[in-house]
Image (spheres, grey):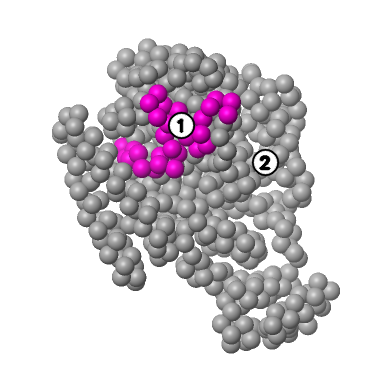
Amino acid sequence: GVATTLNNIGGVYDDLGEKQKALDFYNQALPFWRAVGNRTGEAVTLGNIGVLFQSTNRPTQGITNLEQSLKISLEMRRGLQRENRQKFLQQNGGSAIALVDVLINQKKYAQAFEWVNLFTTADLADYTRLINAKVINPKAQKALDNWSKKNQQLESLRQQLQSDRSESLPQQIRQLEAQVYSQAENISRRFPEVAELFETTPADIKNLTSSIPAGTVVVQPVLLTNIIDMPNNVAIFIFTKGELSVIKKSIDPTEFNKLLTQYLKEIQDESNSNYRETGGKLYDILIRPIEDKIKALSPKELSIIATGQLRHLPFETLSDSKTNQFLIEKYPVNYLTRISNNSLKSPGVQNAVPPKLQAVLAFGNPVPSDPQNLPGAEAEVRSIKEILPDSEIYIHNEATLEKFRSQALRFDFLHLATHGCFKTEDCKKVKLKNNTLLFADKPLDIANAALLGLQGTQLITLSACQTAVDTNLNDASTGLAGVAYIFERAGAKAVMASLWAVDDEATQQLMIQFYQNLKQGMTKGEALQQAKLKLIKDHPYYWSPFVLIGDAR
């Protein structure tokens, strides 16, 4: 109680601008917190001291105290189970924003980027991290060792698949995969020390930055807002292979949120023509400050890591009021999630010329009766077969989940043109349970999508309604990818998914063009860009919802 009161008196003096008195009281509170072992209180007071130093132009002491505060928060989180970890970070993120701000001011960009990502991390659930992992808890270690043995069996079956193309082997792999993945999920939920293995680490951040493909520029805008005594900014990190810079632009957070909400409504309403003006304002905030930098790097691909409120924004629709061009007219745009570096690391692809696309496994219109009928999706799938005759397509009652599970391993490109319900409540309009994807025999529960085992899949296209929308719009943890993130987690190198309910006919046109472009040897990023440019004269509602997440090569 004494510690709390001393800290609060410090806060009052801080608000009154009597900084030295504030510091005296904060410093009196610290030994009390430590004496009673109250780690939360200690972290809060250290954070307060850090912000005070930051606001009185003493950056070195500011950095020291803020880092100490955040290290305590991260240590405390180690004891939490997976479902509570993200919420804990969101509640303790104020010091992280302050630290990132002061590090950027001191031009310590790599450190700033590291803290941004340590504090905006989502559940990674990259199961390869459990291979040969070592933890202190003997029960958790025993569970991990058993899991590793099973995983080795799975890997040797996958090796066999290179030479053995029989029907029964994929079935065997599927069954074992389901066991291996659900066991991994179970272990990571039971033991906090295993959940810790899934979190972003400095090594992951180095991996991501070192695996940026040549010709790609990565941009991560981060909102640094709502911290007392600090200016509100958006910090835009710009990466190329081996180089990192940051540009800050000041914003009014309330105005910015209003602008973002308004814009997302406008581009989802084909009768609204204000999107150019609103998108132009967002362009001026998010792209204009870094435009010259991007131009100087002349990228073949612009990759965006979107966090927080920005995870629903199709950046390619932002409009340059000076040239009247959309961003997509300047560069192919794709998105990266926390686990995209798994796909970017793929060996050899960077230097080799990839073979032209030959075949796709496609499923469409599994239930051809109202309210689930999707005639456009059916036509879309038939068109894929015309463009790529070696493709296999399944429509109506042949488009079963069982068929998808057994055939998916044989193809690098998978296409699902079907309804999805990606909400916390059921989708009554199309008679679908919440968080499911429609197949002819039984729906796929999205929670189990990560168990599909899509290693080797170059691209899975989810040509359904709102596939990239988060299952919970208030939950920032899943990032822009939402449901698509789960398929990337299952091993797919890239996922194409939609941000909102899509127009059946426009989707069909876009997809046909996309596959024709891939057939000609374009990269995934270029193929999607060129397909969108064919529809660019239409309202963005028609061409912008589909986004590419993961490896765009």
Amino acid type of the residue tagged 2 in the rendering? Arg
Residue 118 position (above or below residue 452): below
Residue 93 position (above or below residue 471): below
- Image quarter of residue 101: bottom right
Task: Classify mark 1: helix, strand or loop.
Answer: strand
Residue at figure coordinates x 65%, y 33% from the top left: 318
Q: Which residue is mark 1?
A: 437
Boundaries of the magenta span: 428-456
Residue at figure coordinates x 22%, y 55% from the top left: 149
**Given this view, does label 1 or label 2 mark the residue nearer the observer?**
1
**Other residues around mark 1 within 10 Å, as few (<14) / some (14–19) / many (≥20):** many
- Residue in front for this viewpoint, 244 or 372: 372
Q: How far across and how far down the image is residue 452, in percent?
A: 35, 39
- Residue in front for this viewpoint, 178 or 117: 178
Q: How far across and how far down the image is residue 160, in percent?
A: 17, 39
Q: Which residue is mark 2?
A: 288
Residue 379 position (above or below residue 340): above
Distance from Cα at disc 1 to Cα at disc 2:
39 Å
Q: Locate residue 195 relative to residue 543 in the image: left or right.
A: left
